[in-house]
Amino acid sequence: MKHLLTGLFICSCSLAVAQTSLNTIFAAGVEDAERFTTNYLAPFSESTVYGFSTGWYNTADAKPLGGFEISIVGAITSHQNKEDKKTFVLDPNDYQNMDFVENPGTARAVSSAFGDIEGTRVFVESQVGGSTVRQEFELPTGISAEGFNFVPSGYLQASVGILKGTEIKARFLPKITYEDASVGLIGFGVQHDFTKWLPADKILPIAISGVIGYTRITGDYDISDSGLVGGRDQRIEAEMSSWAF
């Protein structure tokens, strides 16, 4: 089976499991493809932001000068009971070249990256040499169709104490390549324990800290072999970033 939409791998490095690649959507043109993939990926992008924004701290008690911690941080975001995240409404009137094979011109719900709607066929038409050329293909389904109701994420994170009540943090995922897609992650954060400045710090078993973290995810997907648009060195590049406070 061809792997599901690049975005799934770009964002989570996992679950490359679907029957239809999003490569075919580019047959409808860049503008239609961008509109479709934005809606298709929206719930997955939201889930990914939450997944990679967590895990910045294990305790409010900041490490002493030179104290350090190295962790493998993992998270799972579930969408099992979130039906509104599994579909979106595709209205052919919003598209320039793409329409449904059955009941064309009528808006209907189609699968998002989390969904399980299969067998939805669309077509695109274009003029080539004065003749109308029509191409039909099936819209991609989502990971629920493969029995997955969650999205995992993971990375390596390190923290070290530098000043009184302050520690800096860094997270990293080396660039990983799978078939034609690759993804990497880097992030930085700082935590400050305000109670370290209070006389009661040695008496009361309480720590109150503030944490700020920034995470940046980048990925790319080579579509040169899709055969849909002439050219070479063609690729999709994606970037996603988040702040956590």
Image (spheres, grey):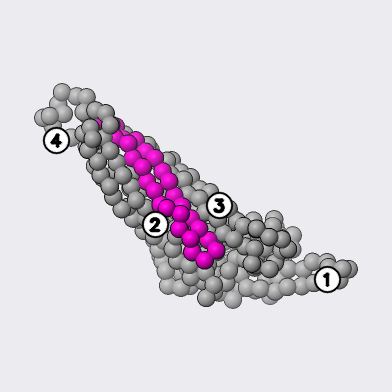
Give residue 153's mark: 2
Residue farthest along the left direction in this orientation: 203
Amino acid type, label 4 = Pro
> Of discs 4 and 3, which sits in the foreground?
3
Say which label, 1 or 4, has the lower sequence index.
1
Q: Start and end of the magenta stretch?
A: 165-192
In the rendered image, which residue does mark 4 sit on?
205
Which residue shows up at 48% across the image and 67% down it?
16
Figure check: 72 above or below 87: above
Which residue shows up at 46% across the image and 45% down it?
216
Contact (Cβ within 8 Å) of mark 1 with mark 2? no
Amino acid type, label 1 = Thr
Residue 20 magenta-highlighted: no
Figure check: 103 above or below 190: below
Say which label, 2 or 3, has the lower sequence index.
2
Residue 93 seen from this side:
no
Task: Quadrant for the C terminus, please.
Answer: top left
Say which label, 4 or 3, has the lower sequence index.
4
Figure check: 27 above or below 55: below
Which residue shows up at 36% across the image and 58% down it?
76
> How many angstroms separate mark 1 from mark 2 (CA)?
45 Å
Give residue 132's mark: 1
Residue farthest along the right direction in this orientation: 130
Figure check: 53 above or below 130: above
In the rendered image, which residue does mark 3 sit on?
238
> How many angstroms separate mark 3 from mark 1 (CA)?
34 Å
Say which label, 1 or 2, has the lower sequence index.
1
- Residue 202 or 183: which is nearer the viewer? 183
